[in-house]
Image (spheres, rainbow, N blue to C red):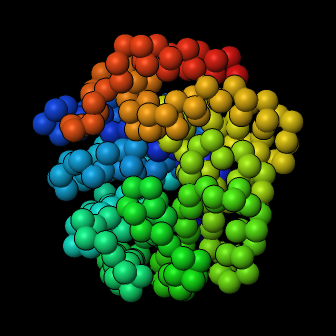
């Protein structure tokens, strides 16, 4: 699949249900992936931050990829997340061998990284396979902020085909997208995470929405993405307003905890978040339930 198509539209990022020993539940994961396929998401972001890739062994990550390829391979493009350089290179090769379509890479390190270290990290992983790679700019987690100059430099590396951006602090999607497009090739895709900014990002011309909520609520997420991509501001605003209670919970608790609550509420899986992350308490879970019910009839 061409990178321009792979990193476009709604990319849904599901949790990776696993037991307390970190063993992936193939049945539960397949159930989530099938829901995303039926909702016609444009791609699946497997083993992203929501997918708990930082908490799983290499063996379990590979098993998750193999499960996903068996479940939806050839029907929905699969983008797979990776970590430190040697493990990321190994997972890139594992993902290629298993049949994945692309890679997502964040500069995760215990020791703060320099721009040159991040550049060399991406060059090494991009060269480990011929899969198209998306830069994961996630400073809230990694504490590393990509400069626009570094993104442009990385966009010139073979196989690096896209960037997943955080929401701009000043809200100026159009300005940021214009600056990046002025210095990258037309084939380089620009997408955003931060679900509460999805409508604004897509209406402003972003190529993709890398969506947390799409992993468990793919149908309403698909409707929001399609309305926004089509430039239908009224419909995008209507759907986005229905999501507002959930966006507020994402901001308050972090989407990772909320997604595990949603999985349980919808009886999609009963796995607890990996420790040391704790599940939401009964009162907060009830608030998640109420927010989810507002989205059922969209």
Residue placed at 68% from the left, 83% from the top? 183
Residue 295 visible in image = yes
Task: Name the foreground residue: 212 vs 113.
Answer: 113
110 relative to 242, above or below: below
Which residue lies most toward the left here? 21
Picture quarter containing residue 102?
A: bottom left
Residue placed at 46% from the left, 50% from the top? 45
Task: Name the foreground residue: 161 vs 50.
Answer: 50
Residue 84 visible in image = no
- Which part of the image, by quadrant, shows the C terminus? top right
Q: Position of residue 89 (x, y in %)?
A: 27, 72
Residue placed at 39% from the left, 49% from the top? 49
Q: Is residue 233 left or right of residue 106?
A: right
Numbered label tally: 0
Q: Position of residue 292 (x, y in %)?
A: 56, 20
Q: Position of residue 40 (x, y in %)?
A: 61, 39
Q: Position of residue 218 (x, y in %)?
A: 57, 34
Residue placed at 44% from the left, 34% from the top? 253
Q: Is residue 244 left or right of residue 102?
A: right
């Amino acid at each position: 699949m061409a990178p321009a198509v792979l990193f476009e539209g709604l990319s849904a990022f599901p949790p990776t249900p696993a037991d307390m020993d970190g063993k992936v539940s193939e049945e539960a994961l397949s159930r989530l992936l099938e829901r995303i396929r039926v909702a016609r998401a444009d791609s699946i972001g497997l083993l992203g931050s929501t997918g708990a890739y930082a908490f799983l062994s290499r063996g379990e990550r590979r098993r998750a990829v193999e499960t996903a390829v068996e479940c939806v391979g050839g029907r929905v493009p699969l983008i797979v997340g990776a970590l430190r350089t040697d493990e990321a290179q190994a997972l890139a090769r594992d993902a290629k061998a298993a049949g994945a379509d692309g890679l997502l890479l964040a500069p995760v390190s215990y020791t703060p990284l320099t721009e040159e270290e991040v550049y060399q990290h991406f060059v090494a992983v991009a060269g480990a396979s011929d899969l198209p790679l998306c830069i994961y700019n996630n400073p809230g987690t990694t504490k590393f902020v990509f400069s626009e100059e570094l993104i442009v430099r990385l966009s010139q590396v073979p196989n690096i085909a896209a960037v997943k951006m955080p929401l701009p602090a000043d809200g100026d999607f159009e300005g940021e997208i214009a600056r990046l497009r002025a210095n990258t090739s037309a084939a380089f895709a620009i997408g955003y995470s931060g679900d509460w900014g999805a409508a604004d990002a897509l209406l402003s011309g972003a190529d993709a929405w890398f969506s947390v909520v799409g992993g468990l609520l793919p149908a309403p997420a698909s409707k929001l993405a399609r309305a926004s991509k089509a430039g239908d501001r009224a419909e995008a605003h209507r759907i986005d307003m229905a999501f507002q209670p959930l966006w507020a919970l994402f901001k308050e608790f972090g989407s990772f905890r909320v997604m595990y609550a949603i999985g349980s509420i919808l009886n999609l899986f009963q796995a607890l978040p990996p420790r040391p992350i704790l599940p939401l308490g009964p009162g907060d879970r009830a608030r998640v339930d109420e927010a989810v019910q507002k989205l059922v009839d969209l």
